[in-house]
Image (tube, rainbow, N blue to C red):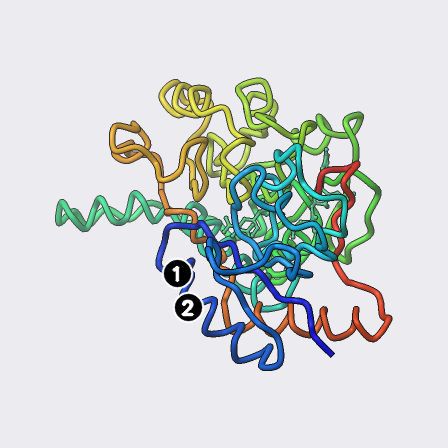
């Protein structure tokens, strides 16, 4: 039987998104199927049944008349949802232990960095200054997680086990052991009023765009030993109002920020974030999608789908995530 081809459209532009690396992995896990690295002038679009993609150009997927499933090679599908010509076939996103563990590492690292006053201590080291400030316990700090999905729920659990007070916010009600959960717009202010370190792990949708703005930052709690609250965003750049973040850092509304994602990526060289003393910056690598893990995840989903089973982690297009 002629198996439909798998088309790979990978436009990440960084080492992790090397198209050849992804192609080599998919060739290994799909030995009986042709894996087409697009654009490939010699391929017939009608042969393509599956597409595995990262940031495909709008319109690219509409070229395949016999497409059955789109696999997004990351967790966030905002780039795909913005494509008005996206074929009406199931869209599967990544939700796997490997990616979740990587994100939890990032969140724990950055919460601890602010909690343990690392920016101050590194500055002291550079200046050869022996000037310890008193250090409070984790239990004196409330961490708030926006987004209690695959990633947020795991990070919340890890932080709770480190002794932080943890609160979370989602669209629908949740119950997570040891985490005080809030949901919906009506409970947003009550959630914010408790938080000393805010971690954003929301998807970017019409409802969450620029949710991290001055109005929200002003509602955070300022009574912990940290003083001014801190924001950590590893969701998407479109979730944040960047001018507001800079102004709030400068006027003391915020005490610090860890940012992994930006409105424009790569972050332009003239962005003030690069040199801001209160910003800890990473280049959208909080949680990389691992080609070994994810090619296997996609191949297994195709195998199950072709055997008549259900696909996992299918995006709800009405919700946008
Ligand atoms: P999930 O879909 O599992 O979880 C999303 C969470 O956000 C859910 O709890 C959902 O609520 C909540 N949510 C969505 N919309 C709203 C809203 N309007 N109000 C309140 N809560 C809302 O996603 P993941 O946890 O897997 O991933 C989250 C995001 O992290 C991705 O979309 C992606 O953008 C980003 N990401 C970033 C990476 C990086 O390297 N920087 C790597 C991987 C992901 P409910 O549970 O009620 O549906
Ligand atoms: C993702 C990402 O969404 O890496 O998986 O940003």
Q: Is mark 2 within 8 Å of ligand 2?
A: no
Q: Nearer the viewer, residue 28 or 48?
A: 48
- Residue at 56% x, 62% y: name it: 99
The answer to whether the residue labelled 2 contacts the one labelled 1, judged by CB atoms less than 8 Å apart, is: yes
Label 1 CB sits under 8 Å from any ligand 2 atom: no
Circle 1 — which element? loop
Q: Look at mark 2 in the image and give the residue it sits on.
A: 21
Residue found at the very far left of the displayed protein? 128
Determine whether 81 is above or below 15 in the image.
Answer: above
Q: Residue 67 occupies which quadrant of the picture? A: bottom right
Give the residue pinned by disc 1.
18
At mark 2, the secondary structure is helix
Look at 53% across and 51% down and name the residue there: 54
Placement of the C terminus among the 4 image quadrants:
top right
Spot occupied by residue 307 in the image (x, y as percentages of width and height): 83, 75
* Image position, residue 318 (x, y; %): 79, 36
Residue 97 appears left or right of 103:
right
Q: Quadrant of the N terminus?
A: bottom right
Q: Label 1 crowding class (10 Å Cα cut-off): few <14, some 14-19, many 20+?
A: some
* Image coordinates for residue 202, horizontal then vertical, percent: 63, 41
Question: Residue 306 location, x and y as percent?
Answer: 79, 71
Q: Nearer the viewer, residue 45 or 261?
A: 45
Are there few (<14), some (14-19), or many (20+) residues within 10 Å of tag 2? Answer: few
Q: Residue at x 22, y 44 (%)?
A: 123
Q: How many angstroms separate mark 2 from mark 1 (CA)?
A: 5 Å
Which residue is nearer to you in this view: 9 or 210? 9
227 shown above or below 46: above
């Amino acid at each position: 039987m002629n198996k439909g081809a798998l088309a790979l459209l990978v436009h990440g532009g960084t080492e992790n998104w090397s198209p050849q690396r992804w192609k080599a992995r998919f060739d290994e896990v799909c030995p009986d199927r042709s894996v087409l690295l697009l654009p490939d002038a010699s391929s017939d679009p009608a042969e393509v049944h599956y597409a595995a993609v990262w940031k495909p150009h709008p319109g690219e997927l509409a070229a395949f008349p016999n497409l059955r499933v789109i696999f997004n090679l990351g967790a966030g599908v905002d780039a795909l949802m913005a494509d008005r010509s996206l074929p009406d076939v199931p869209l599967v996103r990544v939700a796997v232990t490997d990616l979740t563990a990587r994100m939890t590492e990032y969140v724990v690292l950055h919460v601890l960095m602010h909690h343990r006053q690392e920016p101050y201590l590194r500055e002291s080291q550079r200046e050869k200054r022996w000037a310890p400030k008193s250090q409070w316990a984790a239990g004196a700090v409330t961490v708030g997680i926006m987004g209690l999905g695959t990633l947020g729920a795991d990070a919340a659990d890890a932080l709770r086990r480190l002794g932080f007070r943890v609160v979370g916010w989602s669209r629908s009600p949740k119950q997570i052991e040891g985490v005080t959960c809030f949901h919906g717009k009506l409970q947003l202010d009550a959630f914010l009023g408790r938080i000393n370190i805010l971690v954003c792990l929301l998807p970017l949708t019409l409802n969450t765009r620029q949710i991290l703005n001055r109005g929200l930052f002003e509602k955070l709690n300022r009574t912990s030993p940290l003083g001014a609250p801190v924001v950590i965003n590893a969701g998407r750049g479109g979730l944040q109002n960047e001018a507001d973040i800079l102004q709030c850092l400068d006027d003391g509304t915020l005490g610090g920020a860890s940012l992994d994602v930006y409105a424009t990526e790569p972050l332009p060289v003239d962005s003030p974030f690069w040199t801001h003393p209160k910003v800890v910056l990473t280049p959208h690598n909080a949680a990389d999608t691992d080609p070994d893990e994810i090619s296997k995840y996609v191949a297994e989903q195709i195998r199950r789908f072709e055997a008549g089973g259900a696909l996992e982690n299918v995006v709800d297009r009405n919700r946008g995530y």
